[in-house]
Image (cartoon, rainbow, N blue to C red):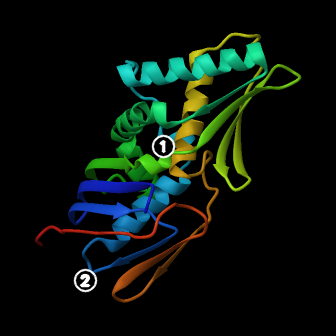
Amino acid sequence: MASWKLCVEDYGKIKSAEMECAPLTLIVGDNNCGKSYLMSLLWGIKNIGAIHLFEKRDVEINEEERLLKDWISQQINLAFEKGQSIVGMEDISDWCRAVINQRLSQNKDSLLKWIFNSEQVSVNKIQIHLSNRAFKERKLCFIRTTDDNIIMKADYGKNKTDNYGIRNLEGKTDDHSAESLMKGIFAFVLQINFWKNQTNVSIYKTNQSVFGCYQCAFSGKSAICKKKKDY
């Protein structure tokens, strides 16, 4: 089962599509139906980096973002006080889903411009549907280092972790620190890069299909593509 599904509406030639993101993603369809558009978008989400994909553009903070950043600040404070704070992720799943899709909505035009180096490709809606599997049994560990920095370790299990760090805060948190670690959490649950252009994706085109090989990039088994515009 895939941990997340990519959904788009009115994207190039595609009226609507849903695609489960898997370790091996195969998109099959008629010529000129939008396969390359979908694979390019998936490649962009993977490679632009969470730091840019979820860049904050709206000065207003919605309730889910406020709650998520408050939660992150609490873990940082606990790590300063006790040395570390180890927490599961299921309690923050709804907040993550809401903020991820809010930021995607804000940044969809800049994402497409980066992918295609053009402003002529447009999309009405991009959403990521995260399954419970993206959060279940995964843990975050906030650790205070000897020089009073904070490291957030994201535990995938099977001895695989990612590390995200913030500078010395002298026991205090700020919005910038919470923002940075929040993007690290998004990179963790989606299993995408935090920084730009660290690629482990290969794309192969044939006459009738686009074949995408994702090397340790996603969790899941299958990909589904539906519907196209009449043209």
Crowding at dot 1, Cα within 10 Å, few <14 / some 14-19 / many 20+, comes out as many
In the image, is 220 to the left or to the right of 19? Answer: right
- Residue furthest left in the image: 230
Tell me which residue sits at (50%, 49%) in the image. Answer: 190
Where is residue 55? Give x, y as percent: 48, 34
Residue 53 disc label: 1
Residue at 63 percent of width and 23 percent of height: 177
Tag shown at residue 228 = none
Q: Residue at x 75, y 13 (%)?
A: 81
Question: Under tag 1, what secondary structure?
Answer: helix
From what the image shows, is residue 65 above or below residue 132?
above
Q: Choose top left, top right, bottom left or bottom right for residue 93.
A: top left
Q: Is residue 70 visible?
A: yes
Q: Quadrant of the C terminus?
A: bottom left
Q: Earlier in the sequence, mark 2 or mark 1?
A: 2
- Identify the image quadrant of the N terminus: bottom left
Identify the amino acid type marked 2.
Answer: Asp
- Seen at 62% across and 46% down, the residue is 195
Residue 102, compared with residue 176, is above or below; it is below
Q: Label 1 amino acid?
A: Leu
* Residue in the foreground of this view, choosing between 224 and 209: 224
Q: Report the residue marked by disc 2.
A: 30
Dot 2, crowdedness within 10 Å: few (<14), some or many (≥20)?
few
Observer able to see residue 55: no
| Spot occupied by residue 84 in the image (x, y as percentages of width and height) | 74, 25
Q: Give the vertical position of 138 relative to 28 (above or below).
A: above
**In terms of secondary structure, where does tag 2 sit?**
loop
Residue that lies at the very extreme toward the front in this rendered image: 137
Relative to the observer, which residue lies in front, 70 or 53? Answer: 70
Farthest-out residue, bottom: 207
**Can you give x and y, in whole percent of width and height, for residue 174 in the image?**
61, 14
Give how far apart the Cα atoms at labels 2 and 1 are: 30 Å
